[in-house]
Image (cartoon, grey):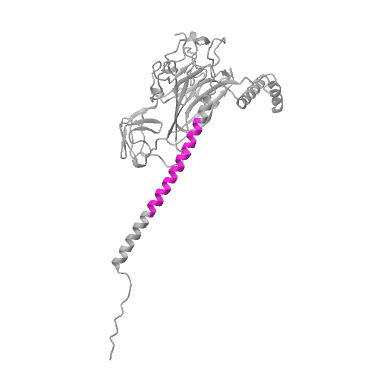
Amino acid sequence: MNATMPQRRDLGFTLIELLVVMGILSGFLVLLVQLVDTGLRLFQEGELGQLTADRSSRAQRLLAGELAQLRGSGTGRDRDGVDDRLLVQWLPIGLPAQPEPGPTRVQVLRAAVHLPRDREVPLRDVWLAARALAAAPGLTPSELDAQVAAAREHEPLRGFGNLLLLPWRQEGADGALLELRAGWFLPGQLVPVGNDRLVDPFEVPVPGTPDLPGLVVHALTTPILTDLLHVELLFWSQQTAAWGTAPAADLRSGGRTPEGLWDSARGGWLVDVASGGAFALDRGPASLRDPTDDIHPHAVLVRCVVAQPPDAAPEGLLAEDLVAGDTSLLLVNGDRFPGPVDGGWVKVGPEWMRYARRDGDVLRNLQRGQRATKAREHAVGTRVHHGRTVEFVVPVPHARDDWNG
C-alpha cells in the first residue's frame, strides 16, 4: 500500500506582512524620537530658564545693593551746602558729542552714596598717588608707594562718595544688548578731560558735552552688569499715587505718576530736553546751594530686562525685513516664541516695540520706538528678543518731600 506523502511548504512572511510590520516599527520609532526630542527640548528649556533666572536674581541683588547706598539728609537744615545730591537725567545713549535726530535715550544717575571700606580704600590710594605725582612727577614707584603710605595717616576714610551709573551699548551683532556701567568717586574728586583740564564729574550739568565727554565717562566707569536689554528707574515723589506700568520715558513730571527723572537740589539743571528733561519740581539756580529745600524720593522702582545667554538659541528671528513704518512683524516660528500671545514687549536690534497680540507667526499692532528708542529698519534674520523682566522696589530711608509748598 502506497502512502501519499504531504507536499512540503516553505514557511515565512508575505510581502504584505512585512510591510505591515515595518509600518508598525516605523511608527514606534517616530514616536520614540518625538518623545526623546521633547524630553531633550524640555530639559534644555529648563536649564536655560534656570540660568536666566539666576542671572535675573543676580541683577536684582546688585542693583538693589547699589541703590540702597544712596545718601541724603531727611531735614536739610543741619548743613550749609548741598553735598548729597541725587540727579537723574535722560541723555542720548553713549553720550555722543553730536547725537543723531531722535536718539535712543537712557537714564544717567549721579548720586551721593555710602562707600564701604573695600571700595573707598582703593579710591583714596589712587587719589593720593595722583596728588603726589602732580607735586613731583619724577617719583620712582618705590618713592610713590612710600609717599602714599605716609599720606594715608593724614587722610582718614570718610565712608561716603559719589556714584555714576548709566546703561551703555554692549558690543554685539544686533545692537540690542546693554551693559550697566558704574564709577565711584571721592567727594570733590577731579578727573582729567583733556587739554590739561580737570573737572569734578558731579559739577558738570550735562555729561556728554565738552565739559565731560562721553569717552571720558566710558573710561571712568566699568561694567557691573552685562547682557541686559533694558534698565529704567522710577521715583516715588510726594505727589505719586501708584507705580503703574507706564515706562519711565513716557511719564510726565509733576503728575500723580512716578517721576522718571530727578534733581534733589532742584537747581535749574533739568529744564529742557537738552539738559536731560524738564523736572516739574525744579526751583531754579537759587535752589542749587540751598539744602533747606532739597527733596528726595520715598522709593525707587527698578525695571530691568535680562537677555537670555548670547550663546542660546534665539527666542525669535525675523522672517522678513521690517521697515520703520511696519505695524506687524513676521517670525520664523511663532510657536517657539516665549512672549505672551495677548501682547507684550520685544526688542529688535536697538529698538523696543510693543505688540497687541500674536497670531501664529505674526506679532500684530506694533507700537514702534518704545522705551525711549527709535524706530529703525531691521533685516531678515535679525534676533527678536523677549528677555526676562525683573521689577522691584528699593526704599529710600532719607525721603524728603517739598515742605515749602
Q: Quadrant of residue 249?
A: top left
Identity of the residue furthest to the bottom in this view = 1
Measured as percent of width and height from the top left, residue 119 is found at 60, 26
Q: What quarter of the picture does the N terminus occupy?
A: bottom left
For the point 32% across and 66% down, which residue is it?
Answer: 18
Q: Position of residue 163 (x, y in %)?
A: 54, 22
Q: In this rendering, would 71 be left or right of 268? A: right
Rendered view: 333 above or below 66: below
Apparent side of residue 256 relative to residue 118 in the rendered image (left or right): left
Establish if 368 lies above or below 382.
above
Q: Is residue 245 left or right of residue 131?
A: left
- Is 255 magenta? The answer is no
Q: Is residue 38 magenta?
A: yes
Image quadrant assignment for residue 279: top left
Q: Is residue 300 visible?
A: yes
The segment highlighted magenta reads 32-60
Image quarter where the C terminus lies is: top left
Predominant secondary structure in magenta? helix
Q: Position of residue 314 (x, y in %)?
A: 41, 40
Does the rendering let one see residue 96? no
The one of 304 and 99 positioned closer to us in this rendering: 304
Picture coordinates of residue 363, whole percent (x, y): 32, 35
**Which residue is at a point 46% across and 37% down the rendered structure image?**
52
Say above or below: 117 vs 268: below
